Amino acid sequence: MKFSWSNSVFPIAVVFSFRMLGLFMLIPVFTLYAPQLTGATPALIGFALGGYGLSQGILQLPFGMLSDRFGRMPIITLGLCLFALGSLIGAITHSIYGMILARILQGTGAIGSVLIALLADLTPDEQRTKSMAVIGMTIGLSFSLAMIISPPISRHFGLQGIFYLSFIMALFGLALLHLMIRKPPQERFHADAEAKISLLKIVIKNRHLLRLDFGIFCQHFILTATFFEIPLLLQQQLKQGNLAQQWQFYLPLMVFSFLMMIPFIAVAERKRKMKPLFLLAVILTAFTQCFLSFAHGSWWFLCLLMFLYFTAFNFLEASLPSLVSRQADPASKGTAMGVYSSCQFLGIFCGGAAAGLFYPWAGSSGIFLMNASLALLWGMVAVFMKPNVYLSTVIVHFDPFAWDKTELMNKLKPLSGVNHLLVSEEEQVIYIQICRERYLAGSVEQVLAEKEKRRAALSTV
């Protein structure tokens, strides 16, 4: 079947964005409105803020594995229904306990890994990297858009408006899933896109990947804890007349911090300065959090520090998944990314819960100092990161009936720039980890083509 971006990549990206937008929109406004709920305390508000991360982090890997057994479409449908149910409960509840239930239910729709697997099923191997990049950009845009549109929506409609909008987006996602996204002709396991339970032990024992997993945990712990307090600080600035509406703070912040991040990414990749710039971004995170602890009352200091923080955040958010992908073995890349995603969501939960517990006795300063301490610990761990790894993965089709696996690997391993090979006879593809500077494009295909020519010549004799 001919590949089409319009009935595979784009609608899957939209479903992804609807769900992530629904989750992200609460971040910049939740602590402003949650105190109005019956029984609300700072600790319970923090638990509700990060609650979706707990269920999402726990269920991310199991949902992906269930989709291998029961199919992608049924599991995605179940996940979107759970997300819709959680959103509806969030819209109608008046108690903090109902809100916690709503947030946990939203997180149980942990379909991110299943959507990635569906994308891999529908996308030709040579288009998969581009397709994954589209999904990555979609998540980033969803976060930025949520920061901007959430304050005006909540200002007019309260938290209920955000939850009702999330409910509607979940329904639209279901419609897209069943009306626009075609069912894959064959659902297979993809080593580069899916987790496998038997590979978990290998991934968890890899100390280089564990450092990156700890990094994404810290990144989202700090983000969620920061946004426990930032909406309250902005509310004070509104009262002082320094700000008319909160979106006027978030819009330039998102735009300029993103633009500021781009040259750093370019230098890190082109000049091969990823590790020093990565460490600089972690140190900048610690620096901004430390200064926020005592300078958050000043409007201009708040703007400057949040701009610096989000510049570092955007750089790290773009770099971390790329580093995991490069450092993971091709055979376990999907599993490594699954563990990484789980750590990310667990960081969201722990950040919200810790901020709620700290706030009553330590206040704003205590939350920011907690974040700064964690960032310093992250920096000490990141010092021992694996030196710069600039490897890419190439996926090439092959005929498993034409090749003996050992013979194939012996032919390909000596090729210039080839670092590691994984031959998947089930998928009929070879995952090749390469150094792009030394790899001669088309060299693998040439080896495969020569064998095909010899087979064709023998068949005509």
Image: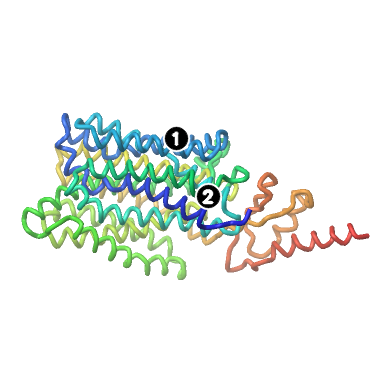
Residue positioned most to the right: 461
In the rendered image, the residue lying farthest to the left is: 240
Q: How is the image coloured?
A: rainbow
Q: Looking at the picture, which amino acid does disc 1 mark?
A: Leu
Q: Relative to residue 27, is residue 451 drawn left or right?
A: right
Q: Quadrant of residue 383?
A: bottom left
Q: Is residue 15 left or right of residue 283?
A: right
Residue 30 % position (x, y):
22, 43
Residue 403 in the image: above or below residue 418: above
Instruction: Tell me the distance, in whole angstroms, between the alpha carbons under discs 1 and 2.
Output: 18 Å
User: Is residue 211 placed above or below 100 in the rendered structure?
Assistant: below
Say what secondary structure mark 1 lies in: helix
Q: How many marks?
A: 2
Q: Which residue is mark 2?
A: 119
In the image, what residue occupies the spot 20% across and 53% down?
Answer: 152
User: Which one is in front in this view, the residue at disc 1 or the one at disc 2?
Assistant: 1
Q: Residues within 10 Å of mark 2 (few under 14, many from 20)?
A: many
Q: Is 285 on the left-hand or right-hand side of 277?
A: left
User: Which image quarter is the C terminus in?
Assistant: bottom right
Is 189 in front, or is 355?
A: 189
Identify which residue, 421 or 394, lies in the foreground.
394
Residue 347 place in picture, x, y as percent: 34, 42
**Looking at the rendered structure, which numbered label has been put on residue 78?**
1
Secondary structure under tag 2 reads helix
Q: Of marks 1 and 2, which one's residue comes earlier in the chain?
A: 1
Nearer to the camera, 61 or 457: 457
Residue 34 location, quadrant: top left
Residue ID at (36%, 57%)? 141
| Rendering quarter of residue 351 | top left
Residue at the spot 15% in from the left edge and 37% down from the top edge: 35
Q: Position of residue 138 (x, y in %)?
A: 40, 55
Q: Position of residue 311 (x, y in %)?
A: 30, 61
